[in-house]
Structures are given as C-alpha cells and as structure tokens.
Amino acid sequence: MLRKAILLLILVYGFILRIAHLGYQSMWLDETISAAAAKGILEHGYPLLQSGAAYTRALLFHYGMAFFIWIFREDFGARLISVIFGVLTIWLAYIFAKKFIKTTFPRLAFPLLIALSTAQIIYSRQARFYQAFLFFYFLSFYLFYTIIIKKEALFRKQWKSYALLIASLAFTMHIHLMGYILIPLFFIIYLMHNLARKTLRSPLTWAAAIAITAFSAYLILRLSPTAEMIALYSFRYYRAYFSQLALLLFALAGLIISIYKNPKPHASIALISLTPFLGLFFIREFATRYAYFLTFPLMLYVAALFKEAKFRYILLAVFIAFMAPSVFTLTPFREAAYDPSMPLADYKGAAAFLSTLEEEYPVAVTWSPAAAWYGYPADYQLNYSLSGLGHGFWRPVNGRERFANAIVVNSQAQLPEEYILVMDAQGARKLPAGNYNFTPCETLFKSYDISVALCKSP
C-alpha cells in the first residue's frame, strides 16, 4: 500500500512538472507542423493544410491532438496529449522495473528518475509525437517480452494479450518509421531466448556476433556522409545527453551488473535501445530529439546500480540534485535554448503584434507552419534548406508551399516592392547569402529570435 501511495505521488508530481504553464511558451518549429495538421482536422475532418495538401504522418496522434485543442484551445490543448504520454511513461517505468529488476527500490527509483528527467519533461511538453513514440516503443517491448518470451497472460483470454501487443506495435510503427526496427529485433530476441545455453556459449556464436557487429560498424562508416561527421555526431550527442558523465557511467555499470546477473532480458533491452541509436548515424542531420529516448534505459540502469549500494537512498537524492536541479521550481520562462537542433522563436508574440497593424501589407515569412497555426498571413515563403542538404522540405506545388499556401520565393526580385517580413533566427541564419537585401527594412517588433519589419525592395 505504501509503495502504491509513493508511486501515486511521483505520478502527480510528474504531471505537475509537465503541465505547469504548458501554453506559456511559444511553439518551436516542429510543434507548429503538428499543430497546423491538427487545426486542419478540426476545420475539415482530416489534416488538410491551407494549400489543399494533407499531412498524413502519425494520423492517429494528430486526431488525438485535435481533440484536446477542441476542448482546451491554443498551445495548451495542442501539447496536452504529450503530457498524458509523459505521465504514462512514468507508469511504464514502474512496471518495467517490476518486470526486469524485481526488487522494491528500483520500482520507485526508476519512475522517480523519469519523472524528474529534464529531457523527459521537455519532450512531454511538446505538441509533437516524440513522447508518444517513446511510450509505445518501450511498451511494445514490455508486452512482447511478457507475452511471447515469458508466455504470461495479461488477461484471462490470451487473445486479448496478443491484440494489445499488436495494437501497441502498430501504433509505434504508425507514429514513426523507426518503430519498424522492432520487428527484426523481436525476432533476434526470440532466437536469443530459445537457443540452447550451449549454443549461446559456443565460440561460433560469439564469432558470428563479432562479425555482425564489425559489419554493422563498416556499414555506418561506409553509408554515413563521412567518418568525420560520425565523430562530430558522437561528440554532439555526448554533449547533449551525457555531459553529466556520472549518468553514463552509472548506467553502464548498472547494465553490466544486470547482464551479469540475468543476461537475456537485459541484453534484449540493450539491443532495442542501442540499435536505433546507431541508426541515427545514417541520418545526415543532427537532432537531439532523435536520441532522447535513450534516457529511458539509462535511468533504468542507474536505478539498477543504486539498488546494489548500501546507502542507495542517499545516492539517489544526490544524483537527482545534480541531474535535474531545475525541476524543483515551477517558474515559467519564455525563452529556452535547449539545443541548436530545436530552435525556438516567439511566433506567438509576432502573431499578436501583426494583429494590431492597421494597414495591410503582403507578408513574407521564414517559417510558414507557424503562420498556419497562429493564424497570421503568409503570402511569401523565403526558400532555404532546413537541413543544409537541399530544399526538399517546402516541396512547392505550382510554386506554393504546403502549410500556409504561400508562394515560395528564391530571391529578393520575387518579393513585392513593399512588404512585412517575419523572420526567425534560423531563417536568417540559413537564407542563401546574396539572395536578399534586408538593409532597407524598418524593425517594427522584436522578441527572442524573431523580428517583424516593414521592408521595401531596393
């Protein structure tokens, strides 16, 4: 009873951290894409964008988002679905520890670490499907291990257990393509648990495992852009998530101890966690949101390590104090520079200012999804490469982009003589040098990483 009461307190506090001032901060780039899709659902019954194109990615997630926007409106409603998945992830941590570590301490330490994790809180407060994917990804593994490997029934009628597993796996793959990697990994895990112990200890088995690992490393080096970029990605991901070296070292020690004591389940968790992370090196774009799901297994093995210590509760308290000191304050803040791959600008403030202008001008923007969500006009979209690898994101059809139906322009000559320019810091940084001249522009409004200016073509 006491354990359940403590778990309830952890869930409640985790919920408070995720929902406090949820609509206060303006949305960042990716959030406005999902919000614009959900807005289309509310207006048309399906995610129809202003251009007439449909945004079909993660449909079920966006229908859920649209439901909460319908009830609560604006940014708060758009983000609420991720808050729910964030709290569910705390609960998932509890049943994970109960299944794979079993002793009492990790059952509460693991959900507490997830509840207070800065990365988990950040992505549980976003109008995007990152937290939903993390939840269904690890839930699918939990269900697969429980139902298929351990042959345990979750319901009296076993078909309901299988149906739940299939539904969770389907949601995972529906939300993000990375979910498909679970199918071959489940097959490997099944073989690993059903091969005889003698076979697992065979030198031939180890030789095959080493050969597969070496071949995978070769593929990464061969298919990724350059070996230098892999080194750069490694440094950036380390700096983003493992700058607190204790987290990595504690988790690694906990994983080694867990594999030594019970090799098959913990090797399986390591396999499903590290394989998609290695796959990130095939993507020619760095983004910490692709890798933050590693915080789930990292915290699991920190809890597993601490359970071995005599002064485990003191260690846990000290670790939390150093890991996430900011989670003990609920003070709202408008500006947040989480990392360069998650650029934030005050689109909400720009929209409010534009609504006060008495005279109408054509509007040129650097990020049309924000205009589509916040409802300010976007007549022209300044074209630039979002990732540095081409201009494919805007995909102009008949010269117009998808989100706000703005005309895609590539140079100053395509803009009218007089216009309003809404430019965020990312657009200013990535616009092709020499294509535009904004010297004659008069700044009318400025907030963090965004400005609104009245411009005249030279």
Image: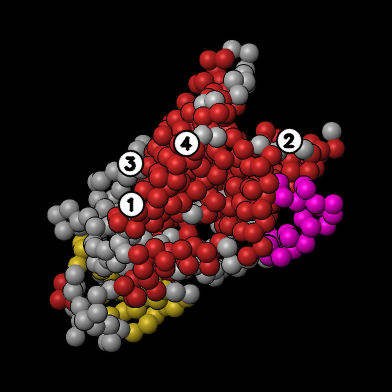
- In the orientation shown, which residue stands out farthest toward the front? 203
Q: Would you identify the image quadrant in which residue 376 lies?
A: bottom left
Q: Which residue is mark 4?
A: 205
What is the CA distance from the residue labelled 2 to the residue labelled 1? 38 Å
Q: Residue drawn 77% across and 55% down?
A: 316
Residue 100 forms part of the magenta stretch = no
Q: Secondary structure at mark 2?
A: loop
> Circle 1 sits in a helix, a strand or a loop, which is it?
helix
Give the mark, 2 or 3, whose residue is nearer the N terminus. Answer: 3
Residue receiving disc 1: 219
Rounded to the nearest angstrom, the CA distance separating label 3 from label 1 is 31 Å
Q: Which residue is mark 2?
A: 102
Which amino acid, mark 2?
A: Lys
Cα separation, mark 4 vs mark 2, equals: 30 Å
Q: Which residue is mark 3?
A: 56
| Mark 4 residue element | helix
x%, y% of residue 416? 18, 74
Residue 23 seen anywhere in this rendered image of the structure:
yes
Find out whether the residues at labels 2 and 3 contact each other: C-beta distance under 8 Å. Answer: no
Q: Is residue 438 above or below residue 101?
A: below
- Label 3 Cα crowd, 10 Å radius (few <14 / some 14-19 / many 20+): few
Asked whether 131 or 113 is in front, the reply is 113
Residue at the image position 43 percent from the left and 52 percent from the top: 278
Q: Nearer the viewer, residue 141 or 79?
A: 141
Q: Amino acid at mark 1?
A: Leu
Which of pointers 4 and 1 lies earlier in the amino acid sequence? Answer: 4
Which of marks 1 and 2 precedes in the sequence? 2
Direction from residue 304 to residue 77 in the image, left or right: left
x, y percent for residue 47: 34, 42
Kindly identify the amino acid type of the residue bearing the numbered disc 3.
Thr
Magenta span dominant secondary structure: helix
Q: Position of residue 314 (x, y in %)?
A: 83, 57
